[in-house]
Image (tube, coloured by chain):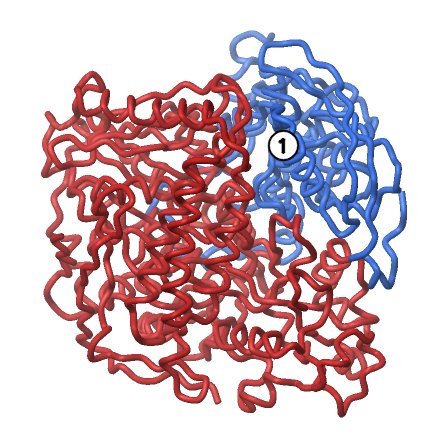
Chain colours: A red, B blue
Amino acid sequence: MKLDAKIPAGPLADKWNNHKAKMRLVTPTNRRKYHIIVVGSGLAGSAAAASLAEMGYEVSCFCYQDSPRRAHSIAAQGGINAAKNYQNDGDSVRRLFLDTIKGGDYRAREANVYRLAQVSTSIIDQCVAQGVPFAREYGGLLANRSFGGAQVSRTFYARGQTGQQLLLGAYSALSRQIGAGTVKMYTRHEMLDLVLVEGQAKGIVTRDLVTGEIEAWASDVVVLCTGGYGNVFYLSTNAQGCNVTATFRAHRRGAGFANPCYSQIHPTCIPVHGEDQAKLTLMSESLRNDGRVWVPKNSADCTKPASEIPEEARDYFLERKYPSYGNLAPRDISSRAAKEVCDEGRGVGQVVDGKRLGVYLDFSAAIKRLGESAIRERYGNLFDMYENITGENAYRQPMRIFPAVHYTMGGLWVDYNLQSNIPGLFVGGEANFSDHGANRLGASALMQGLADGYFVLPYTVTDYLAGVGLSGRPSVDRPEFKAVVKEVEERTHWFLNNNGTRSARSYHKELGKIVWEKCGMTRDKAGLEGAIRDLQALRDDFWKNIKVVGAGNQLAPELERAGRVADFLDFGIMMCLDALTREESCGGHFRTEYQDAGEAKRNDDTFAHAAVWKFMGEGKLPERHTEPLTYEEVQLSTRSYK
Amino acid sequence: MVKPSEQSSHDSERTLALRLRVWRQLRGGEGHFEEYSLAAVPVSASFLEMMDMLNEQLIREGKDTIAFDHDCREGICGMCSMTINGMPHGPIPGVTTCQLHMRNFRDGETITVEPWRARAFPVLKDLAVNRSAFDKVIQAGGFITVRTGSAPEANNTLIPKSIADEAMDAAECIGCGACVASCKNGSAMLFVGAKINHLNILPQGQPERERRTLAMVKTMDDVGFGNCTNYGECQAHCPKGITLDVIAKLNRDYLRARVKDFFSSTGKARKGGE
């Protein structure tokens, strides 16, 4: 597998500008002759589709939801980082770059991250011009808050709904193009495969989820902005429909999948309440500013109400282990610490699957110090949401929280231009692997999605198209398209007619349990080897016993689910294999064998690279390739929060 | 309806047995209610998790599952859309269907579940409807025209905090359509009013203010939404607390736009009126 990152020469700070100046262009009158397919309508997809269409290209955009406005970018709460330095607190492009590289535990590509920091300021300008109602100061200027361990206040926000407002901004830009006829929008269409013609990505095959029609679409270039794979864990903070199918199908067609073992587990989510739960809900990280995290010292106390456990019988484990950061220790570290105390049998709350998986987040000290009304003022909406979901009043008793899968840093391998190793296949947003390394900092996902969509892809896709020339778009009557359509039809037909016994959801749950236990917050060799065996057996069973009800010509949620779970099963095996072969700990990937008294121990000599997996055939294990990460300006060092 | 308890440490043990009357309909067909019994529903489950349980039961019986729209399950994407016991998003104010929990129902209760009912939202299957009419209204003018890369420095325009907050109040609309489903007229005035208020009060939204208002209202009428006759059901069922004043402001902006259009150099007055 050829993995040329195509990082432009020259000093880090000049790379992007030099590269832009050298990229090829397409004349305005020729642009409408090119057809671009964008899959996904979240921040990256909507922004890319709108920007490319407004340049003059013919764009088709596909999403599985009933409207592009529903994409899961909408659920991001906290904010978006940008190096504006409006607070006069010493922020700069370079500082944002350094924070992001360090946050990713030195496993991201330097040049991409620097570009991300550079374009961050333009994103804010763009969004404000679109009417995104960011929080403001009384003087009318934009407000900022601090976030996720950074020492500067660079996070722009719109109440607790920043993702919603940014997505509605991108959706409005996209809608303007749809109204103008320059983007054709296909909602409730799921991409089920990628079509290659002579080694280049030239189209996709979709299923219309309403009518069941399977169709081929030809284009000059395909842009995937289809999000992350967090739902491989079954329970996550992702939306129900989030899936790996588009990127995994591209992987099966030859695209390298990079670092699938990097997943982010957010420490403050509402714990699992029972076997029938389908979704986990995030409670904003900001709560840890005033809440104290604890569990009983003695497991016998775990069944008592919190109020009956005296102060001296409580273990404030984050304050004990990380005295300087305390309850504000970073996400990966706080998550692992919570898992540890629950594994010791000191978790609180309901027993699910034989364990109590929850720790207290206690506001009583803050309420005593500041008064209930001050806490209500700061976090009232979160306390209401908590009560709505759990039926408990967190002003009177501590919240219970537990870590949950939240974001995935791995994704399709892309070069500096966000092009995969398949020519003509570009990948943006959470679907690619490039910017967050082994751990993502808070308020950086929105930044990356919009950076890719508004300010990177429009340039790099243009450069590619200029090289392809005008005769590039094939007809869907070509045998390559017909063959893929036939494969998709056969698979769909097989699902609908297999006389099985088990639902797709039951397989998904079992898959989720295996990867959460063995490839979640902590991993080890024996566990991962066992998980791969278990997943292979589960996969074999799936292909015998899956039962899909419904009709092929109607909305068929079970058919959709079965296809997604099938890909998640194969993907899960690859994820565990990646975790097994990365014999070090870094960021969200914590191998218990590689640690310094509980802290992640990187091995820069052997593993300062991106692991890129190549598909080797149905039922076979993928093959590991690497892209070395060379650091021109950054010194690798150890993250410590003690 | 039961009030959420202050202390519900016994949630884990309490379950409900329910009867469900659910609307079933194939695309292009006639609909009807079907009745189902579902036992052992934990009160800690969400309404949609209860529907998942029912669907798993149907799969075990070899029957087609009930199609319904849902995605984020945290009350922000706007995709979930069930009329529960006659109320869009169910009996609890300020929550979407996905955030409604079973502790708000009684053991032995019969729950009626229907799709959004509105002329502009045809049923696709069972409880899923087509809300693309909302997208069409936004495509007609629910935006500020700004080319990528052409935006001025963000802090060049000062926006008073009160204006930014008011715009944000309106921008919280999730586009779920409960306002239309709850309205006897199938009116989308709360939805359109929210978007108009968000964009029309901001300085960036001024250049296209009249054009936006006229285009969105025209499309709203064209795609089959009814008019507002001030029942106020939309406000009562809006999960995001959008209030009726956005409709008053929409009417004001619409009138203003019509008058300005009438007297403009290309408008109706010049052409001799209507």
- On screen, residue A434 above or below A590: above
- On screen, residue B79 above or below A121: above
> Percent from the top left, x then y, of residue A359?
67, 73
> Percent from the top left, x then y, of residue A316?
66, 85
- Horizontal arrangement in the rendering, residue A276 relative to residue A168 (left or right): right
Which residue occupies the foreground of this view, A135 or A439? Answer: A439
- In terms of image quadrants, where is residue A314? bottom right
Q: Residues within 10 Å of mark 1 (few under 14, many from 20)?
A: some
The N terminus of chain B sits in image quarter: top right
- On screen, residue A132 above or below B138: below
- In terms of image quadrants, where is residue A398? bottom right
- Horizontal arrangement in the rendering, residue B108 relative to residue A228 (left or right): right
Which residue occupies the foreground of this view, A587 or A620? Answer: A620
Residue A583 appears anywhere in the view? yes
Q: How many marks?
A: 1
Which residue occupies the foreground of this view, A572 or B250? Answer: A572
The C terminus of chain B sits in image quarter: top right
Residue that label 1 marks:
B60
For the residue marked with disc 1, what is the amino acid? Arg
> Percent from the top left, x then y, of residue B110?
85, 31
- Horizontal arrangement in the rendering, residue A641 relative to residue A428 (left or right): right
- In terms of image quadrants, where is residue A10? bottom left
Chain to which mark 1 belongs? B
- Horizontal arrangement in the rendering, residue A510 relative to residue B34 (left or right): left
- On screen, residue B29 above or below A580: above
Which residue occupies the foreground of this view, A312 or A568? Answer: A568
> Percent from the top left, x then y, of residue A483?
23, 23
Report the residue at 45% width, 64% height from top.
Answer: A518
Report the residue at 69% width, 13% height from top.
Answer: B31
Q: Secondary structure at mark 1?
A: helix
